[in-house]
């Protein structure tokens, strides 16, 4: 029987018996170019729809038994076009977005960096670099990751140039500067006006005297008197108020025209490191470092990379006393790094702690604060971090590590299995920690349980008037679920 015949029978049924005795089903017919509907039906948007009905003449007469039925006369003519359907109503407005889930990667859980999926990364990888739970950075090809992206080709700035900057090129103080490239303090190199000459980063008039020089006066090889200004004086030419320049003793530096004991730091030693005596040393295998950091000696076969001030080499794992980022030895790893000497630089996150150079998950205690279920797995099967009660009536401050239970034996020696049904919208039996002398963490209350023992759970919303706050007001009292009737 064809689909069309089925529809005709259903229509006849409704006419004879009424819709209480039968119903006309809505057929979901699928069609396409390879699967036409047939029998005059049309395919509209992948669904077969019946043809428009017209008024036809009556069918043919009944044939004889030998010849069968007579031919049917032409059916009804094609019906007129149907009226257009009513316009559809507009769609309902979309609901507002729900509140964002709390971040997993925070300074409390991650000493490295946070990737785009809110996961903690160790922060020493070339494509995931950073510390302090900041967003991970890709250092690319022009920088190296050492807890932060360090440029391989550093730009000219005050940390690495005491002269002037010609683009990214430092023009140091002294003979390298000329009247057309003059300046100090990493300023953009300038051109001295006519009649002035560049002297240690400053354009000054020819000749030197107290009237035109705040620093000291010296004589050039050509016999000219020139001024060495205060802010540009090296230890070899020190003085003030137009006096003759003098050379400072070994280990001294010139500060405001006076020779003083040298202080080694990032400002005075931007391209090197400071040794134990406080002297600035240029990077070498025995004194490796930049930016005024403390010099370190590269162990074994490791060599000093002068661009970064870091010891590196293929034997890092066996020769580095700190931790290794691939072949780079981090002699003084940042706070929070977890490692064994020569091991990879790692940072523990998501509730784990560093023990003997490895990140481990500490034992879970009942009722401890938590942000995710993984922080409570130490409690065993069905462990979870409760954030709200079952129907959302109350919240657990800072989270609450617990597990579902049938008896107190499942809660260990530090807690009991209690029935929380009806309590502030909670449902079920859960392990809760014992309390002594009403001592529970903020937001929780020590409920009297059995004898002198008590258990910590949510602060009650209502307390009996005139009674010590040791029992909740209404509802079924707490009881040990393992011994419940």
Image (cartoon, rainbow, N blue to C red):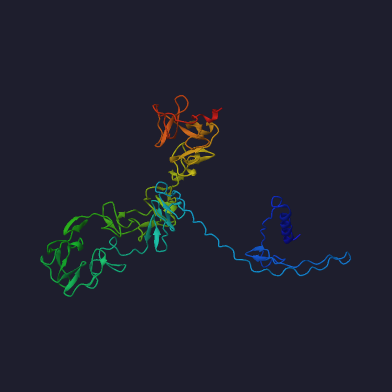
> Which quadrant holds the C terminus?
top right
Query: x, y (%) of residue 427?
Result: 52, 37
Residue 55 is left or right of residue 276, and the answer is: right
Which residue is at the front of the view, 144 or 442?
Answer: 442
Q: Is residue 466 above or below residue 142?
A: above
Q: Quadrant of residue 260?
A: bottom left
Which residue appears at 53% of the width and 33% of the height? 410
User: Quarter of the image holding residue 161?
Assistant: bottom left
- Viewer-closest of 438 and 230: 438
In terms of depth relative to the viewer, which is nearer, 170 or 463? 463
Tally of numbered discs: 0
Residue at 23%, 73% (x, y): give it: 180
- x, y percentage for residue 107? 39, 48
Of the 4 image quadrants, the one containing the N terminus is: bottom right
Which residue sits furthest bottom? 194
Residue 338, x across and y down, in percent? 42, 47
> Residue at the top extreme?
451
Residue 435 image position (x, y, % from top left): 43, 31
Asked whether residue 61 is in view, the answer is yes
- Which residue occupies 87% across, 65% down? 64
Q: Is residue 341 positioned above or below 89 on the image?
A: above
Task: Inspect this view and state whether residue 363 appears.
Answer: no
Compared across the picture, whether 78 is left or right of 325 comes to right
Q: Is residue 65 left or right of residue 233?
A: right
Image quadrant of residue 437? top left
In this view, the residue farthest toward the right is 66
Q: Is residue 157 left or right of residue 413?
A: left
């Amino acid at each position: 029987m064809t689909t069309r015949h089925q529809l005709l029978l259903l229509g006849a049924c409704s006419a004879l018996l009424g819709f209480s005795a039968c119903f006309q089903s809505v057929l979901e017919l699928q069609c396409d170019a390879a699967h036409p509907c047939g029998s005059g039906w049309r395919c509209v948007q992948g669904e077969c729809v019946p043809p428009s009905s017209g008024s036809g003449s009556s069918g043919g007469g009944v044939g004889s038994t030998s010849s069968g039925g007579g031919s049917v006369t032409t059916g009804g003519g094609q019906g007129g076009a149907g009226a257009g359907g009513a316009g559809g109503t507009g769609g309902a407005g979309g609901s507002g977005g729900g509140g964002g889930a709390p971040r997993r990667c925070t300074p409390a859980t991650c000493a490295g960096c946070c990737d785009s999926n809110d996961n903690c990364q160790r922060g020493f990888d070339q494509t995931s670099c950073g510390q302090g739970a900041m967003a991970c950075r890709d250092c690319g090809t022009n920088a190296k990751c050492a807890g932060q992206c360090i440029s391989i080709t550093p730009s000219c700035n005050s940390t690495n140039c005491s002269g002037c900057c010609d683009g990214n090129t430092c023009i140091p103080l002294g003979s390298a500067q000329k009247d057309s490239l003059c300046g100090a303090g990493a300023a953009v190199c300038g051109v001295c006006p006519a009649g002035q000459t560049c002297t240690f980063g400053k354009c000054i008039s020819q000749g030197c005297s107290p009237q035109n020089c705040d620093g000291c006066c010296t004589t050039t090889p050509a016999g000219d008197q020139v001024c060495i200004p205060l802010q540009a004086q090296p230890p070899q030419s020190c003085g003030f108020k137009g006096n003759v320049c003098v050379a400072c003793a070994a280990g001294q530096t010139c500060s405001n025209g006076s020779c003083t004991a040298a202080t080694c730091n990032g400002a005075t030693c931007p391209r090197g490191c400071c040794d134990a005596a406080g002297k600035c040393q240029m990077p070498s295998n025995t004194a490796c470092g930049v930016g005024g950091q403390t010099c370190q000696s590269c162990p074994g076969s490791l060599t000093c990379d002068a661009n970064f001030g870091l010891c590196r080499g293929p034997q890092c794992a066996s020769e580095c006393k700190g931790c290794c980022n691939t072949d780079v030895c981090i002699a003084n790893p940042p706070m929070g790094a977890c490692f064994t000497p020569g091991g990879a630089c790692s940072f523990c996150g998501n509730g784990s702690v560093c023990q003997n150079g490895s990140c481990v998950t500490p034992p879970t205690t009942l009722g401890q604060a938590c942000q995710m279920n993984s922080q409570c797995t130490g409690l065993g099967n069905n462990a979870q971090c409760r954030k709200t009660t079952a129907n959302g009536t109350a919240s657990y401050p800072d989270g609450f590590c617990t597990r579902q239970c049938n008896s107190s034996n499942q809660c260990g020696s530090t807690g009991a299995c209690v029935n929380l049904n009806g309590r502030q919208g909670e449902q079920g039996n859960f392990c809760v920690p014992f309390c002594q002398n009403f001592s529970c963490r903020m937001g929780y209350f020590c409920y009297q349980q059995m004898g002198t023992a008590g258990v910590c759970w949510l602060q009650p919303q209502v307390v009996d008037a005139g009674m010590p706050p040791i029992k909740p007001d209404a509802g079924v009292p707490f009881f040990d679920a393992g011994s419940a009737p």
